[in-house]
Amino acid sequence: MYSVLEVENLSFGYKKDFLLFDNLSFTLKKGEIKAIVGASGAGKSTLFELILKNLRPFSGTVQSSFCSEVFQDPYSSFHPSYTLLNQINEVAKVDELETYIKKLNLDYELLLKLPHELSGGQLQRASILRAMLMKPDLLLLDEPTSALDNITQLEVMKMFLDNLENMGMLLITHDLDLAKWCADEIIML
C-alpha cells in the first residue's frame, strides 16, 4: 500500500522556546488507521492544522494525499446559511449518498435543513457523511464520535474500519481504549 501521509522531522510550537513537536516523524499508508492520543493542549488538533497547511511548521515537512476531515465541533464545520445538502454538493460526489445515509442512520430530509436545525449528533453524522462522500485518500478524524451515543459511536467506527481499504485514517482521541481497539499504531503526544 502507498503512503497517504508522511510527516518528517516536524517541529512546531506557538512559542519558539516551547515546542509541541520536536522532530516528529511518522508515515500513514492506505489501509491503516493511526491514533493520536494525548492530554488536552498536547497538540493533537494543532497537528491536523499543520497537515491541512493552515499552520506552518518551524521545520520539517508534511506531505499528504487528498484529504477530508471530521472535526470535533460539527457546528463550526458548516456554513450557517446554507442547507447541508447544498454544502455537501459543493465538495463531494453524491453517487453513494443513499448508502452512507443508511450507514449513518440519517434521514434525507435532515440534509435539506440548515445546520442549527439539527442536534449535535445529527450534525456530526452529516459531517462524517460529507467527509466520506469526498472519497479522500486520507481521512482526518478529530474526536469524530464524541457527540454520539455509545451505540452510534460503535456503528460509525465500524463503518470507518469497513472503508479502510480505500484510504488511510488518522484519528485524534482522548479514549485510549478506542485507540487500542481500532488503531494499527498509537502515537502518544
Image (cartoon, helix red, strand yellow):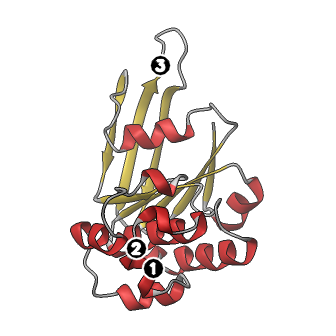
On-image quarter of the C terminus: top right
Task: Find residue 14 and name its label.
Answer: 3
Q: Which residue is mark 2?
A: 113
Q: Which residue is mark 1?
A: 110
Pointer 2: residues within 10 angstroms few (<14), some, or many (20+)? some
Pointer 1: residues within 10 angstroms few (<14), some, or many (20+)? some
> Can you tell which of label 3 and label 1 is closer to the viewer?
1
Looking at the image, do the residues carrying marks 1 and 2 touch, with CB atoms under 8 Å apart? yes
Q: Is residue 113 visible?
A: yes
Identify the residue shown where x is 56% and y is 33%. 43
User: Would you place residue 182 above or below residue 74 in this image?
Assistant: below
On the image, the x and y values in percent for residue 129 come to 43, 74
On the image, the x and y values in percent for residue 90 come to 22, 67
Q: Earlier in the sequence, mark 2 or mark 3?
A: 3
Between the residue at mark 2 and the residue at mark 3, the CA separation in whole angstroms equals 38 Å
Identify the residue shown where x is 32% and y is 75%. 85
Helix, strand or loop for disc 1: helix
The three-letter amino acid code for the residue at tag 2 is Lys
Q: Earlier in the sequence, mark 3 or mark 1?
A: 3
Q: Is residue 143 left or right of residue 112?
A: right
Quarter of image, res 56: top left
Quarter of image, res 168: bottom left
On-image quarter of the N terminus: bottom left
Looking at the image, do the residues carrying marks 2 and 3 touch, with CB atoms under 8 Å apart? no
Q: Is residue 100 visible?
A: no
The three-letter amino acid code for the residue at tag 1 is Leu
> Can you tell which of label 2 and label 3 is closer to the viewer?
2
Task: Give the total of numbered labels.
Answer: 3
On the image, the x and y values in percent for residue 81 come to 32, 59
